[in-house]
Amino acid sequence: MADFRLIQVSDPHLSRQKAYFQENWEVFVAAMRADPPDLIVVTGDLCFDAIEQPDDMAFAREQMDRLPVPWLAIPGNHDVGDQWPDLKFKQPVDAAKRRLWMDHFGPDWWVSDHAGWRLVGLNAMLFDSGLPEEAEQWAWLDTALEGRAGRDVLLFVHKPLYLDVPETTADSTLFYAAGTRRRLMDLAQRHAVRAIGSGHLHRRFVDAHHGVQLVWAPSSGFVMGGFPPRLPVGETEVGYVEYRLGDGVLSHHFIRPPAFALNDMSETMARLKSTVNLPPKPWLG
């Protein structure tokens, strides 16, 4: 019986000075207070742009502390910089950005056991970074999966493993490199990883690869209609994911509260080539 209720929320893009999506966060907090889950997991991009506005990190922590239940979080590219190759902003992850995250949110990779399941969160921005912490995290992941003691595994990363072609070898900031993807999937096959939850693309979608469910959580903040261009999978919708976990049981469905604003940023993306180069909009709440 599935008796543990977990909420995955992703890409809220919170900011005190550029509070374009705070209204949706207010709706989310109210929903969590009205019907509290057992745990909330945030799969990255808590911040609007902590790379240029470090106060976004402090504000995001303040917002997380408003949630009524325990929570865990992993960083995204707007939090700690991007993984290699950083083809867009040339702001790759480094030790200083990672330290800012850990100062506010604690470990950037973690394990948490509930209802016969092992939940694993990774700082996937470290993949292909060449930083010493990349090898440290891989070694830790091997140990965490080896020691799962018969539990099934639900793994969380910020970005999806691929878009629509699992075998792609393209370099992209939208998903992980081929070598990283193969390594993750090999571990998934060996260690009963039943599902991998991600965010980043601001789309909702479910796929399966070699028996592993791949769940793309939509952003709680905004969508980018038509981005990535010509991608034939996924729905551009705001919302979050509810999982039900039990002994050997996993189910999930997408939730879009009626009060969530769609906040389509496609015109901004086309005009500014970014969603961060917006004028200030301070939060006055």
Image: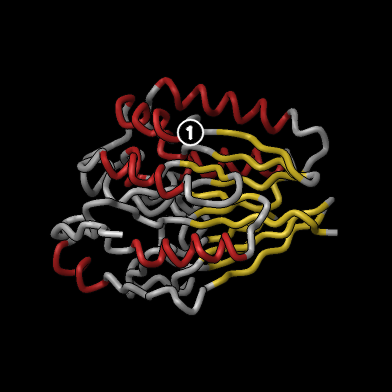
Type of amino acid at the residue the image marks with label 1 = Asp
Q: How is the image coloured?
A: secondary structure
Query: In x, y percent, where is residue 276?
Result: 22, 55
Residue linked to disc 1: 108
Residue 110: give x, y in percent of width and height: 58, 33
What residue sits 64% from the left and 28% below the top? 142
Residue drawn at the location 34% of the way across and 30% of the way down: 100
Q: Where is residue 143 drawn, in percent x and y? A: 67, 25
- Depicted 252 relative to depicted 247: above or below: below
**Quadrant of the snapshot with the C terminus:** bottom left
Taking 132 as reference, is 166 left or right? right
Q: Nearer the viewer, residue 281 or 112?
A: 281
Quadrant hosting residue 81: top left
For the question of whether residue 180 can be seen, the reply is yes
* Farthest residue, direction bottom: 258
- Local packing at callout 1 (Cα closer than 10 Å; few below 14, some 14-19, many 20+) is some
**Residue 44 left/right relative to 173:** right
Residue at image x 60%, y 65%? Answer: 34
